[in-house]
Image: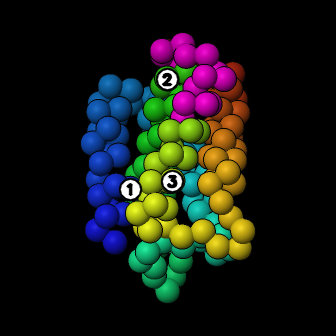
Amino acid sequence: MLFHIIVGFILPWIVGVYLFKNQKKLFIIFYPIGAATSFLINEIGFNYFWKMDKTFEELSLTSLPYDLGLYPIMCCLFICTIHYKKMPILIAFLVFTFGITFGEFIAVLMEKLVYRNKWNIIWSGVSYLTAFFIVYVYYKLVRKFIYLN
Protein backbone atom coordinates (compact mmCIF):
# COMPACT_ATOMS: atom_id res chain seq x y z
CA MET A 1 0.00 0.00 0.00
CA LEU A 2 3.01 2.28 0.50
CA PHE A 3 3.47 2.43 -3.28
CA HIS A 4 -0.12 3.65 -3.72
CA ILE A 5 0.21 6.24 -0.97
CA ILE A 6 3.42 7.64 -2.46
CA VAL A 7 2.33 7.58 -6.13
CA GLY A 8 -1.34 8.36 -5.58
CA PHE A 9 -1.14 10.90 -2.76
CA ILE A 10 2.28 12.23 -1.71
CA LEU A 11 3.81 12.94 -5.13
CA PRO A 12 0.65 14.55 -6.55
CA TRP A 13 0.31 16.75 -3.48
CA ILE A 14 3.77 18.18 -4.12
CA VAL A 15 2.28 19.57 -7.33
CA GLY A 16 -0.98 20.29 -5.48
CA VAL A 17 0.72 22.57 -2.97
CA TYR A 18 2.35 24.48 -5.81
CA LEU A 19 -1.01 24.78 -7.58
CA PHE A 20 -2.73 25.89 -4.41
CA LYS A 21 -0.12 28.59 -3.77
CA ASN A 22 -0.28 29.91 -7.33
CA GLN A 23 -3.84 29.19 -8.44
CA LYS A 24 -5.94 29.20 -5.27
CA LYS A 25 -9.22 30.07 -6.92
CA LEU A 26 -8.99 27.41 -9.63
CA PHE A 27 -7.76 24.85 -7.14
CA ILE A 28 -10.58 25.51 -4.67
CA ILE A 29 -13.20 25.41 -7.42
CA PHE A 30 -11.98 22.37 -9.37
CA TYR A 31 -10.41 20.08 -6.76
CA PRO A 32 -13.85 19.02 -5.41
CA ILE A 33 -15.25 18.08 -8.84
CA GLY A 34 -12.07 16.12 -9.58
CA ALA A 35 -12.38 14.26 -6.28
CA ALA A 36 -16.10 13.61 -6.74
CA THR A 37 -15.56 12.27 -10.26
CA SER A 38 -12.72 10.08 -9.02
CA PHE A 39 -14.79 8.68 -6.16
CA LEU A 40 -17.66 7.90 -8.54
CA ILE A 41 -15.56 6.12 -11.16
CA ASN A 42 -13.39 4.25 -8.64
CA GLU A 43 -16.40 3.14 -6.59
CA ILE A 44 -17.86 1.46 -9.67
CA GLY A 45 -14.49 0.22 -10.90
CA PHE A 46 -13.25 -1.36 -7.67
CA ASN A 47 -16.53 -3.17 -7.20
CA TYR A 48 -16.70 -4.60 -10.72
CA PHE A 49 -13.69 -4.06 -12.98
CA TRP A 50 -10.33 -3.82 -11.25
CA LYS A 51 -8.47 -4.34 -8.00
CA MET A 52 -5.15 -3.21 -6.56
CA ASP A 53 -2.43 -5.46 -5.28
CA LYS A 54 -3.46 -4.42 -1.74
CA THR A 55 -7.13 -4.11 -0.89
CA PHE A 56 -9.18 -3.41 2.18
CA GLU A 57 -12.41 -5.12 3.12
CA GLU A 58 -14.08 -1.77 2.46
CA LEU A 59 -13.16 -1.28 -1.21
CA SER A 60 -13.58 2.50 -1.08
CA LEU A 61 -10.51 2.80 1.15
CA THR A 62 -8.27 1.14 -1.43
CA SER A 63 -8.54 4.02 -3.89
CA LEU A 64 -8.48 6.80 -1.29
CA PRO A 65 -4.91 8.00 -2.04
CA TYR A 66 -5.85 8.41 -5.70
CA ASP A 67 -9.29 9.90 -5.01
CA LEU A 68 -7.79 12.62 -2.81
CA GLY A 69 -4.46 12.98 -4.59
CA LEU A 70 -3.62 12.10 -8.16
CA TYR A 71 -6.98 12.38 -9.91
CA PRO A 72 -8.33 15.66 -8.51
CA ILE A 73 -4.93 17.31 -8.85
CA MET A 74 -4.68 16.11 -12.45
CA CYS A 75 -8.11 17.64 -13.04
CA CYS A 76 -6.85 20.95 -11.64
CA LEU A 77 -3.78 20.77 -13.91
CA PHE A 78 -6.05 19.98 -16.85
CA ILE A 79 -8.13 23.10 -16.20
CA CYS A 80 -5.06 25.28 -15.58
CA THR A 81 -3.60 24.08 -18.87
CA ILE A 82 -6.76 24.97 -20.75
CA HIS A 83 -7.47 28.21 -18.91
CA TYR A 84 -4.02 29.78 -18.59
CA LYS A 85 -1.84 28.10 -21.18
CA LYS A 86 -4.57 28.30 -23.80
CA MET A 87 -3.81 24.76 -24.95
CA PRO A 88 -6.31 23.66 -27.58
CA ILE A 89 -9.07 21.60 -25.95
CA LEU A 90 -8.56 18.53 -28.13
CA ILE A 91 -4.81 18.49 -27.44
CA ALA A 92 -5.41 18.88 -23.69
CA PHE A 93 -7.89 15.99 -23.69
CA LEU A 94 -5.45 13.78 -25.61
CA VAL A 95 -2.38 14.67 -23.55
CA PHE A 96 -4.07 14.21 -20.18
CA THR A 97 -6.06 11.12 -21.16
CA PHE A 98 -3.10 9.34 -22.74
CA GLY A 99 -0.75 10.47 -19.98
CA ILE A 100 -2.81 9.15 -17.11
CA THR A 101 -3.77 6.01 -19.06
CA PHE A 102 -0.08 5.33 -19.68
CA GLY A 103 0.58 5.73 -15.96
CA GLU A 104 -2.11 3.16 -15.25
CA PHE A 105 -0.63 0.85 -17.88
CA ILE A 106 2.67 0.98 -15.99
CA ALA A 107 0.81 0.08 -12.76
CA VAL A 108 -0.75 -2.90 -14.56
CA LEU A 109 2.65 -4.02 -15.83
CA MET A 110 4.04 -3.73 -12.28
CA GLU A 111 1.05 -5.81 -11.08
CA LYS A 112 -0.06 -3.01 -8.76
CA LEU A 113 -3.43 -3.00 -10.52
CA VAL A 114 -5.29 -6.01 -11.93
CA TYR A 115 -8.14 -5.86 -14.41
CA ARG A 116 -11.10 -8.21 -14.17
CA ASN A 117 -14.48 -8.79 -15.84
CA LYS A 118 -13.11 -7.99 -19.32
CA TRP A 119 -11.84 -4.54 -18.33
CA ASN A 120 -8.75 -3.40 -20.26
CA ILE A 121 -6.53 -0.38 -20.84
CA ILE A 122 -8.83 0.93 -23.58
CA TRP A 123 -11.76 1.09 -21.13
CA SER A 124 -9.49 2.83 -18.65
CA GLY A 125 -8.71 5.44 -21.29
CA VAL A 126 -12.42 5.89 -21.91
CA SER A 127 -13.05 6.31 -18.17
CA TYR A 128 -10.32 8.98 -17.94
CA LEU A 129 -11.65 10.75 -21.01
CA THR A 130 -15.11 10.70 -19.41
CA ALA A 131 -13.73 12.14 -16.16
CA PHE A 132 -11.92 14.95 -17.98
CA PHE A 133 -15.06 15.63 -20.01
CA ILE A 134 -17.12 15.97 -16.81
CA VAL A 135 -14.55 18.38 -15.40
CA TYR A 136 -14.48 20.35 -18.66
CA VAL A 137 -18.27 20.68 -18.71
CA TYR A 138 -18.10 21.89 -15.10
CA TYR A 139 -15.38 24.38 -16.13
CA LYS A 140 -17.63 25.77 -18.87
CA LEU A 141 -20.49 26.06 -16.37
CA VAL A 142 -18.29 27.79 -13.78
CA ARG A 143 -17.07 30.32 -16.36
CA LYS A 144 -20.66 31.44 -16.90
CA PHE A 145 -21.07 32.38 -13.23
CA ILE A 146 -17.60 33.12 -11.84
CA TYR A 147 -14.84 35.32 -13.20
CA LEU A 148 -11.74 33.12 -13.07
CA ASN A 149 -8.87 35.45 -14.01
State the residue lying farthest toward the bottom: 57
Check residue 8 in the rendering and tell me which mark sits there, or answer none: 1
Q: Residue at x 54, y 35 (%)?
A: 96
Give the residue type at disc 2. Thr
88, above or below 142, in the image: above
Give the residue type at disc 3. Phe
Q: Real-space Cα distance between discs 2 and 1?
A: 21 Å
Q: Nearer the viewer, residue 92 or 36?
A: 92
- Kindly tell me whether residue 135 is visible in this rendering: yes
Q: Position of residue 28 (x, y in %)?
A: 45, 37
Q: Position of residue 22 (x, y in %)?
A: 32, 25
Q: Is residue 124 left or right of residue 25?
A: right
Dominant secondary structure, magenta: helix
Q: Real-space Cα distance between discs 1 and 3?
A: 14 Å
How many numbered callouts? 3
Reading the image, the residue beneath label 2 is 81
- Under circle 2, the secondary element is helix
Q: Is residue 46 left or right of residue 7?
A: right
Where residue 3 sits, quadrant-wise, is bottom left
- Under circle 1, the secondary element is helix
